[in-house]
Image: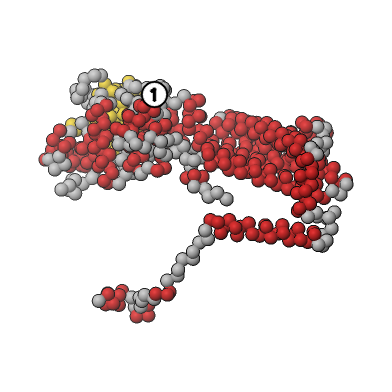
Amino acid sequence: MPDVSMAVLASPSEQVTVRAGAVAQPRRPFTWHQTRFLSWLVPALLVVGWELLARLGKIPPYILPAPSKVVATGIALIQDGTLLPDMGISLLRAAAGFAIGGFIGFAFGTAVGFSRIAGVLLDRTILMLRAIPFLAVLPLVIVWLGIGESAKIFLVAFGVIFPIYMNTVLGIRQVDPKLVELGRVTGLSNWNLVRRIILPGALPSILNGVRYALATAWLALVVAETIAASSGIGFLAMDAREFLRTDVIVLVILIYAVIGVAADSLARLMERRLLAWHPNYATEVQR
Amino acid sequence: MTQQQNVSACGPAVVVHGLKRTYGLRTVIRDLDLRIERGEFVVLLGESGCGKTTLLRALAGLDPIDGGRIEGPSRPAVVFQEHRLLPWDSLWRNVALGLEQNDNRTRASAALAEVGLGDRLDDWPRNLSGGQAQRVALARALVQEPRLLLLDEPFAALDALTRINMQSLVKQLVAEHQPGVLLVTHDVDEAIVLGDRAMVMRNGAIACEFTVSAAARSHRSHPDAIGLRDQLLSELGVGEGQMAA
């Protein structure tokens, strides 16, 4: 009997039939371990290929040393006590510059986000400064501050200010005005309004700025250390260049990469912790 | 109109004299008088744009007023059409938002228990249904033990069944806490079910008001309820209320 009702609904040319094999079986998705394995496959093959080519002498050591050689150099440098102090100095510079730039960016961002007058007075100036690629001020910084610590910290701070500033302003302005109104109705003091409603509401945007600023800070540090430094891992690389120690140079590049990734992971961990309430972050798949 | 002697006599929740509110050249509220006793439930009906929400916002202290006087608590509690819960705070912290004492969690917990969510203290607002979220908003308003409770179409966004449950919950909680209530709504039936008094606002003034009899309040099909419903609908300019039945 169902055929009768079907025939009424469907014209003969589009007869409704059920074909067992025609229904597409959903592909079985990879398990977590399989995905993990496959995503690491290509980088692992690249490293193995690089090692083989270097061992077979297809790539001369002064162009690109074998990965095993780079690792051995790293261990040797740690053992003779030169690598870790230089890494420490570099991290300290990045942290100091980030703290200073972050504080300034956040302070101005908060002022402009809250106050229309501060916005009118400051926003244009800050946006004009932002138009300068921060690396372009490097020669001027060297003239002003020489090649000491302050020059590198300045450059890092200068690069960090703007992403933090922009995202703080944006975050504060995007806070739902209805929640702010609720805060007023509930009788919150200005301080509590900021603490309970405005800053938490702006936090996703601010943390986004932090992540971006971390990348900028790192870039600024690499450039500053490469051009003018007498310590730090950038200096290590430039010093190695004099002696064609490509193994040291590659090592430094890898360290920069690893620390950059670590900083970003840290920022993402912060996002997951601080924004656990936020549906976009709470369920974010760990990559 | 302002001399209603109603319900409990422990002083008025709010008294409004000659309130005026303008937007530019347009007068939204003109010379409005209103008195709400504590424990009294007043429902304000009116078409969109008649000034009822403006009146509520003025009473809430959210908007400035351009004339007249409001004698009432500096900080009435408000429940809005949207729940307006802070998504980054747990339910109990949301409820305790306006509290300053140290036993906040205890008080918030009691308030949440009153609205039937006593077991969800540490849950996030995003895990709530619309009705549950609005119940938390109600708990947040009542935990302050307000003298005046302002409800701005708090059930408008809820589905029909949830709305009925919310209405009886509000009725029960208002009876326990005895604040003066001003409920702004479009819903004539809601006005009859909940109100001690129902007022219709038109062109920025209160056009008429009706006392809702106890019989009308408790039985939808009581002749009083049907009669009042017709009266209110015709005051609102909606036919003769013939859809009732």
Residue farthest to the bottom, as pictured: A12
x and y percentages locating residue A247 in the rendered image: 80, 49
Query: Residue B154: horizontal and vertical position, in percent?
Result: 32, 38
> In terms of depth relative to the viewer, which is nearer, B43 or B147?
B147
Determine which quarter of the picture holds residue A40.
Answer: bottom right
Tell me which residue sits at (42%, 42%) in the image.
B126
Residue A270 location in percent, x, y? 57, 39
Image label count: 1
Q: Residue at x 46, y 24 (%)?
A: A189
Residue B196: quarter of image:
top left
B215 left or right of B111?
left
Residue A261 visible (yes or no): yes
Residue type at mark 1: give it: Asp
Q: Judge by depth and name the residue closer to the eye, B126 or A42.
A: A42
Between residue B28 and residue A125, name the one nearer to us: A125
Q: Secondary structure at mark 1?
A: loop
* Residue at x-position 73% and y-position 35%: A88
The residue under the point 49% across, 40% down is: A276
Does residue B234 appear to the left or right of A203 in the view shown? left
